[in-house]
Image (cartoon, rainbow, N blue to C red):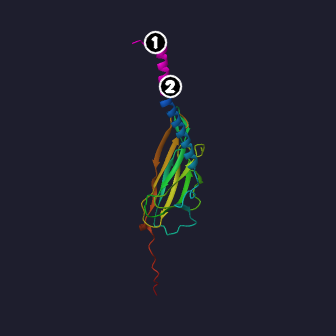
Amino acid sequence: MPKPNEDDSDKMMRNFKLIVFLTVVIPIVALTFFLEMRFEAIEDEIQFLEPGTRDAARTDLDALPWHPVQGQTLYAPAYSHIYHQSGEPRLLTVTLSVRNTDRKNDIALTSVRYYDTSGKERRSLVEKPLRLGPLASTEFVIEQKDKSGGSGASFIVEWKAGQPVNTPVVETVMIDTSNTQGISFVRSATVLEETTVNDKAPATDATSSD
């Protein structure tokens, strides 16, 4: 049986490379392109909208529809930037997430305020009470280019309910993916004040004595 010569070996190697290119490289490139286009489409669909504009479970209210019997004032840390390497600031996008964990009852966000490192209020993010339906959620975004908060920024969140409910989950998510080494972390809110049904003012005695 004749041994394959150098031309035959080169031809076999070229054919092998062609097969690998057709069966491996092209599908990977096509899949990468498809995923990139899909992610861009998803990003276009999930653009940040002002609270109360996404679905019927979240609506602005002119006034609370019930007398509040439960509520909280929460402090949520928000790192508008952190420091890295030799102390250089790294800007982050901050998302405040508020999730109603009650499966049957509404809650209302009555105030969401953003503060900077010095404790100065930068702006209010809720103009009217915002109703969150059962298991509904909403978010507020501080863009990466917004440097007003600083490393010690924070949110003060107030919510109320017309009857006893499960307390909502309130968290901040900080993220930056602007270079090859991304960073993200989450911080939970801390309760500053709490109001429950037991804190209602006692009824006054309308009976007058002669």
In reply to whether residue 7 is colored magenta, the answer given is yes
Single out the residue that lies furthest toward the front: 1
Q: Position of residue 170 (x, y in %)?
A: 47, 53
For residue 76, the mark is: none
> What x and y, as percent, mark residue 161?
47, 64
- Tell me if I can see residue 90 in this picture: yes
The amino acid type of the residue labelled 2 equals Leu
Decide: few, some or many residues near mark 2? Use Cα within 10 Å; few <14, some 14-19, many ≥20. Answer: few
Q: Residues within 10 Å of mark 1 (few under 14, many from 20)?
A: few
Q: Which residues are magenta?
A: 1-20
Name which quarter of the figure residue 39 lies in: top right
> Number of labelled discs?
2
Residue 117 appearing in the image: no
Q: Which residue is mark 2?
A: 18
Magenta span main SS: helix
Q: Classify 91 as above or below 158.
A: above
Quadrant, the N terminus: top left
Q: Which residue occupies 49% across, 41% down?
A: 184
The label on residue 5 is 1
Asked if residue 9 is positioned above or below residue 165 in the image, the reply reads: above
Residue beneath the point at 47% across and 81% down: 206
- Label 1 amino acid? Asn
- The residue positioned 55% from the left and 44% from the top of the image is 93
